[in-house]
Image: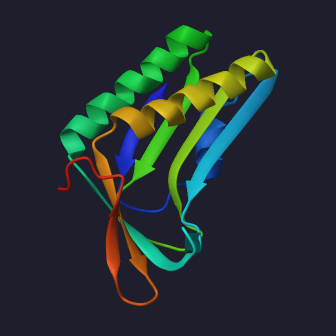
Amino acid sequence: MRSAIVHGPIDVHALLAEVAASSNGATVLFTGTVRELSEGRSVEGIDYDAYEEMAREELARIVREASERFGTGHVVAEHRVGSLALGEASVAIAVGHPRRAGAFDAARYVIEEIKLRLPVWKQELFTDGTREWVDARVAP
């Protein structure tokens, strides 16, 4: 089990290696990436900001909960902060589990809880030069 808030690119191959185990019958990798369109508008990139100390603690808690709830110690999650370009991964979750349902369920749990609980905010940068906070309950 591991989690991190990172400032550089996420190495998904390293995450997969971390959850590899002979007891696993399934490995699931989820990556959230910067897409080119948001509600019909062309996106150039996204800036992610976070209350990092709290985000690290909460992400560790989420990973621990997934491990306990779905019965696997093979859960790794990273969330990136800073400026990201199109196609770059903002979040990655890898889960190894004896069964595919457990692997999928644990990965889904982690991403859904990240979206609900992690103090991370994103600001989309559009190709027309405008910026917009997305789903920001409280902007940084």
Q: Is residue 4 left or right of residue 14?
A: left
Q: How many marks?
A: 0
| Residue 38 location (% of width, % of height) | 53, 68
Q: Is residue 76 left or right of residue 105?
A: left
Residue at image location 20% in from the left, 46% down from the top: 51
- Residue 83 showing in the rendered view: no
Residue at image location 27% in from the left, 42% down from the top: 119
Q: Quadrant of residue 117?
A: top left
Query: Going by the picture, which residue comes out furthest to the front?
Result: 40
- Residue 36 showing in the rendered view: yes
| Residue 105 location (% of width, % of height) | 66, 23
Q: Nearer the viewer, residue 35 or 17?
A: 35
Q: How is the protein colored in the picture?
A: rainbow
Residue at image location 31% in from the left, 30% down from the top: 58
Residue at image location 46% in from the left, 87% down from the top: 127
| Residue 62 location (% of width, % of height) | 42, 25
Q: Reply above or below: 31 against 127.
A: above
Indicate the quadrant containing the C terminus: top left, top right, bottom left or bottom right: bottom left
Q: Nearer the viewer, residue 13 or 104?
A: 104
Q: Reply above or below: 86 against 122.
A: below
